[in-house]
């Protein structure tokens, strides 16, 4: 009998002699190891990626919860500001500080003439406030027990440099009128 390489002629016979005749286990081992390592590496990287995504999801959930809490706090603070900015609340707080309504305004013209009638601001009679009980501390708005007049907070000096009388509102009594257009226009 002739070998399979003997049946082939020429170039094919030379190539056939280079190849082993039987199945080789040594050639399969590195390939199997390569496939196992690639599959194991893929699974490990997939596990790490999944863990990172879950951690990001938890962080996002915490941040959304914190954002909701901060939004609620901001809205509560805005309600407090709105409540304190109501005209009634501002008027009540001004009365507590000893301020009185300013009355009719007086204007100072560009020629130096005073327009309007200046008058002294007087406090309007206020309804009787309930007297604090002996256990409650005396607030600044309540009169002192000694019968002496209570001190009024020092008003800030107006920008115009005009004097402010105690018990009067902090706004100046005179305001500048914008200059009238010149006749040449």
Image (cartoon, grey):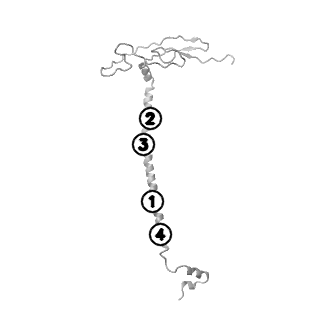
Label whose residue precedes the other's in the sequence (3 or 1) = 1
Dot 3, how many residues are within 10 Å of its Cα: few (below 14), some (14-19), or many (20+)?
few
Q: Residue at x 44, y 43 (%)?
A: 64
Q: Are marks 4 and 3 in contact (CB under 8 Å)?
A: no
Q: Nearer the viewer, mark 4 or mark 3?
A: 4
Label whose residue precedes the other's in the sequence (4 or 1) = 4
Label whose residue precedes the other's in the sequence (4 or 3) = 4
Whole-angstrom CA distance, mark 3 to mark 1, is 32 Å
| Residue underneath mark 1 | 44
Label whose residue precedes the other's in the sequence (4 or 2) = 4
Label whose residue precedes the other's in the sequence (2 or 3) = 3
| Residue underneath mark 2 | 74
Whole-angstrom CA distance, mark 4 to mark 3, is 50 Å
Whole-angstrom CA distance, mark 4 to mark 1, is 18 Å
Which circle marks residue 2 in the picture? Answer: none
For mark 3, give the secondary structure: helix
Whole-angstrom CA distance, mark 2 to mark 1, is 45 Å
Dot 4, how many residues are within 10 Å of its Cα: few (below 14), some (14-19), or many (20+)?
few
| Residue underneath mark 4 | 32
Residue found farthest to the right: 184
Q: Are marks 4 and 2 in contact (CB under 8 Å)?
A: no
Which circle marks residue 65 in the picture? Answer: 3
Whole-angstrom CA distance, mark 2 to mark 3, is 14 Å
Dot 1, how many residues are within 10 Å of its Cα: few (below 14), some (14-19), or many (20+)?
few
Label whose residue precedes the other's in the sequence (2 or 1) = 1
């Amino acid at each position: 009998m002739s070998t399979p390489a003997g049946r082939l002629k020429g170039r094919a016979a030379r190539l056939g002699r280079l190849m082993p005749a039987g199945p080789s286990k040594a050639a399969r081992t590195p390939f199997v190891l390569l496939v196992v390592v690639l599959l194991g590496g893929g699974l490990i990287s997939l596990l790490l990626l999944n863990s990172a995504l879950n951690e990001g999801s938890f962080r996002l959930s915490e941040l959304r919860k914190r954002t909701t809490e901060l939004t609620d706090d901001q809205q509560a603070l805005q309600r407090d500001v709105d409540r304190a900015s109501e005209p009634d609340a501002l008027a009540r707080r001004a009365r507590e500080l000893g301020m009185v309504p300013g009355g009719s305004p007086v204007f100072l013209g560009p020629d130096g003439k005073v327009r309007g009638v200046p008058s002294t601001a007087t406090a309007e009679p206020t309804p009787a406030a309930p007297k604090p009980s002996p256990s409650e501390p005396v607030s600044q708005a309540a009169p002192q027990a000694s019968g002496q007049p209570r001190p009024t907070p020092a008003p800030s000096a107006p920008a115009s440099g005009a004097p402010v009388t105690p018990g009067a509102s902090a706004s100046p009594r005179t305001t500048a009128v914008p200059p009238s257009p010149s006749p040449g226009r």
